[in-house]
Image (cartoon, rainbow, N blue to C red):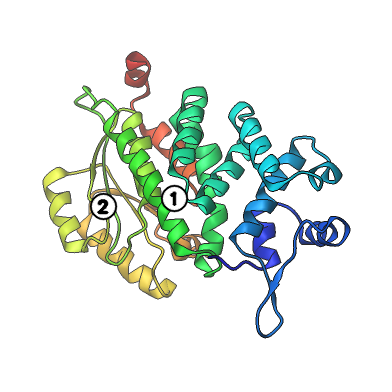
């Protein structure tokens, strides 16, 4: 059972804390619990209710009308609207509800419906990625049940692996070659998997080495495979100094490759002008997409399309 502050509920639902308090007082929609030290908190049932109410409210239902509906009526109305209204905020909200309910069937329906309508990449960019960003903030601060985050992350990981596997390998012998890996101790690979999908979908070649790989092993693969680009994401460095030591060792193992990096300390170093000019730092997946598009064999891509 999760425990959420009013700020956590605001972050997940998009409803301002001030508005939530008005709803509590005027409509008695919510009744927060209290810890033994009298600190207010909300549980999973409260979060689910607020998500459903905010969903209906965004879809033209007045709060005064929602307050008169039973929990079951609210749930049914939300399900009806989410099945027919594929606006991205609605679908992201539906994903959060599926997470709280641990509802794999609902997750599958949301992803498959939106993929059919908008394509896999658009579904990831406009629904899944904003969802991950929203829950990631709370997960990092310990304000969301890790089991919920793991449940959703593993479902999304499965979708990404299937999507990557479904891409045709390039027949172009001059296609760019990418090598992707995560540093030692780095286990969260959704960003790297999505990067692999983006690269492969644009008819590039890639080797995906996965999580927690020593740099000496990366160097051995680089020597054999000779990639054009090496991509990694480092989130677990304790300081810019540690990140710089990692980058220096990575450069020595990839002397002829263009290196692309992301992660908190990488971004800080780039903003401070402390990053090697030969290294590209991308702050989000959109910048990586732009880079891959610019460096892909565009005439070949058009021919394949």
- For the residue pair 25 and 280, the one nearer the viewer reads as 25
Q: Position of residue 107 (x, y in %)?
A: 47, 40
Q: Is residue 145 above or below residue 64?
A: below
In-image side of 74 versus 67 (left or right): left
Residue at the image point whose x is 69% and y is 71% from the top: 33
Residue furthest to the bottom in view is 37
Where residue 49 sits: x, y (%)? 67, 52
- In percent of width and height, residue 144 lies at 53, 64
Q: Is residue 107 left or right of residue 243?
A: right
- Residue behind mark 1: 152
Q: Which mark is residue 260?
A: none
Q: Mark 2 — residue?
A: 210
User: Circle 2 — which element?
Assistant: loop
Residue 56 can be seen in this image? yes
The disc, 1 or 2, on the residue closer to the chain's N-terminal end is: 1
For the point 50% across and 32% down, the residue is: 122
Looking at the image, residue 81 lies above or below residue 149: above
User: Quadrant location of residue 236?
Assistant: bottom left
Q: Tell me: residue 229, above or below residue 122.
A: below
Pointer 1 with pointer 2, Cβ within 8 A: no
């Amino acid at each position: 059972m999760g425990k959420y502050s009013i700020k956590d509920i605001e972050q997940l639902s998009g409803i301002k804390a001030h508005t939530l308090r008005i709803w509590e007082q005027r409509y008695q929609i919510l009744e927060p619990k209290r810890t033994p030290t009298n600190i207010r908190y909300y549980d999973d049932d409260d979060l689910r209710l607020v998500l459903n109410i905010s969903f209906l409210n965004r879809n033209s239902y007045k709060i005064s009308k929602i307050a008169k509906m039973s929990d079951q009526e609210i749930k049914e109305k939300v399900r009806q609207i989410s099945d027919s209204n594929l606006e991205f905020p609605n679908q992201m909200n539906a994903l959060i509800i599926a997470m709280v309910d641990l509802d794999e069937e609902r997750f599958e329906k949301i992803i498959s419906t939106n993929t059919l309508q908008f394509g896999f990449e658009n579904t990831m960019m406009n629904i899944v990625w904003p969802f991950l960003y929203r829950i990631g903030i709370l997960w990092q601060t310990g304000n969301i049940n890790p089991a919920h985050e793991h449940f959703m992350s593993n479902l999304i990981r499965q979708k990404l692996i299937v999507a990557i596997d479904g891409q045709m390998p390039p027949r172009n012998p001059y296609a760019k070659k990418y090598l992707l890996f995560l540093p030692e101790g780095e286990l969260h690979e959704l960003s790297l998997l999505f990067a692999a999908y983006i690269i492969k979908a644009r008819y590039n070649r890639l080797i995906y080495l996965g999580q927690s790989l020593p740099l000496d092993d990366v160097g051995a693969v680089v020597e054999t495979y000779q990639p054009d680009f090496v991509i990694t994401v480092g989130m677990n460095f304790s300081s810019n100094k540690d990140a710089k030591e990692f980058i220096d060792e990575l450069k020595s193992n990839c002397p002829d490759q263009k290196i692309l990096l992301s992660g908190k300390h990488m971004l800080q170093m780039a903003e401070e002008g402390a990053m090697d000019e030969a290294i590209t730092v991308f702050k989000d997946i959109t910048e990586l997409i732009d880079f891959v598009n610019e460096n892909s064999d565009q005439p070949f891509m058009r021919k394949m399309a």
